Image (spheres, rainbow, N blue to C red):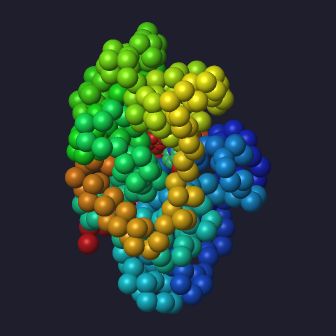
Amino acid sequence: MKAIVFDQCGEPAEVLQLRDLPEPTPARHQVRVRMLASPINPSDLLFIRGQYGRKPALPASPGFEGVGIVEESGGGLLGWRVLGRRVAVLGALSGTWREQVLVPATQAVPVPADLPDEQAAAFFVNPATALVMTRHVLRVPRSAWLLQTAAGSALGRMVIRLGKREGFRTINVVRRREQGDELLCEGADVVVCTADESIGERVRELTGGAGVPFALDAVGGATGSEVVTTLAPGGRMLVYGTLSGEPLSLDPRVLIVGQKRVEGFWLGEWIARQGLLTKLGLVRRIGRLMSAGVLTSPIAATYPMDKIQEAVRAADQPGKPGKVIVRISPPSLPS
Ligand SMILES: NC(=O)c1ccc[n+]([C@@H]2O[C@H](COP(=O)([O-])OP(=O)(O)OC[C@H]3O[C@@H](n4cnc5c(N)ncnc54)[C@H](OP(=O)(O)O)[C@@H]3O)[C@@H](O)[C@H]2O)c1
């Protein structure tokens, strides 16, 4: 089977190679999945560069999620139930940018038939993060303000659509003015562009000086640091990304006065603390919200495995129009 592999960490376009590897055999309670497609997420690029929260065991394959067909079960009731089905792969044992992967049967989740492979490929990482941060961790109430940075990201757009559906109001920070109209069409209440506006001033205007009770930051640096200063007394900011690569810097008094909180969020750690019922409920809810178009991602382009260098360059491009997908094997046939 073909696999995308890297022997050392570094720039993705330089270190990734397409290689032939032996086909894996599933152990009991595992299934073997023929991968159809996988997205290139910012976390994949950080992982290849050795900058992610978990270091790769080299040689390694990237890919934290994807969609495929279960071709073989190593035994057990769950494996038998998903045999032959199209599933989202959550946490493959090897990385998903391979033609064949092994995964515990509990982490091969059947996906709704109406989702194209490109959407089903991005079934979990961003949808679960958007849903968990807003509904389970912050529990943003109806009509409350939620401010978010990197609002034009695939995940940011999911938060906007969730706000529209659940009734909370979003202030959306972007770095390019062109994104404004697109996000207003998605349902954004307000868009703030850091190229020519001050986040602090806009928040003061919108909230009558009170500040925002909830914020999400994936950027850090000057943008994330300014967001901390816009929190209302008792306000909470979840930090979930490092897109600028720059640290947050803040005056501790900003947190002390009004007892505000800045907290980290990492989906993998949150999921690991949940029971089976919560996980099943989350997966069902994601399926429904994806079919309803709330947790879908804009797709920029699809590349075959042998064009992986072009694919990772496109995924790392500022201003890209959506997710870049790696097509690993031919599209699934309608059942
Ligand atoms: N903690 C977790 O568990 C978790 C889970 C999932 C995702 N994430 C994080 O969520 C974030 C979004 O992921 P995604 O897949 O939705 O991303 P994406 O679709 O690739 O979009 C990335 C967005 O970030 C913006 N951006 C990049 N660098 C920036 C900078 N220096 N300043 C301001 N904006 C910048 C880009 O703006 P332009 O359009 O202007 O280029 C783009 O809109 C990432 O940081 C990812 O690692 C975290």
* Camera-side residue of 142 and 288: 142
- Whether residue 88 is situated above or below residue 17 in the rendered picture: below
**Image quadrant assignment for residue 199:** top left
| Residue lying at the far top of the rendered structure | 196
The image shows residue 89 at horizontal and vertical percentages of 47, 65
* Camera-side residue of 202 and 25: 202
The image shows residue 193 at horizontal and vertical percentages of 41, 17
Drawn side of residue 326 relative to residue 167, left or right: right
- Whether residue 273 is situated above or below residue 106 in the rendered picture: above
Q: Residue at x 50, y 30 (%)?
A: 258
Drawn side of residue 113 relative to residue 320, left or right: left
* Camera-side residue of 185 and 255: 255
Drawn side of residue 245 relative to residue 203, left or right: right
Asked if residue 269 shows in the view, the reply is yes
Q: Residue at x 32, y 65 (%)?
A: 284
Q: Residue at x 45, y 83 (%)?
A: 79
The image shows residue 255 at horizontal and vertical percentages of 57, 30
Asked if residue 127 shows in the view, the reply is no
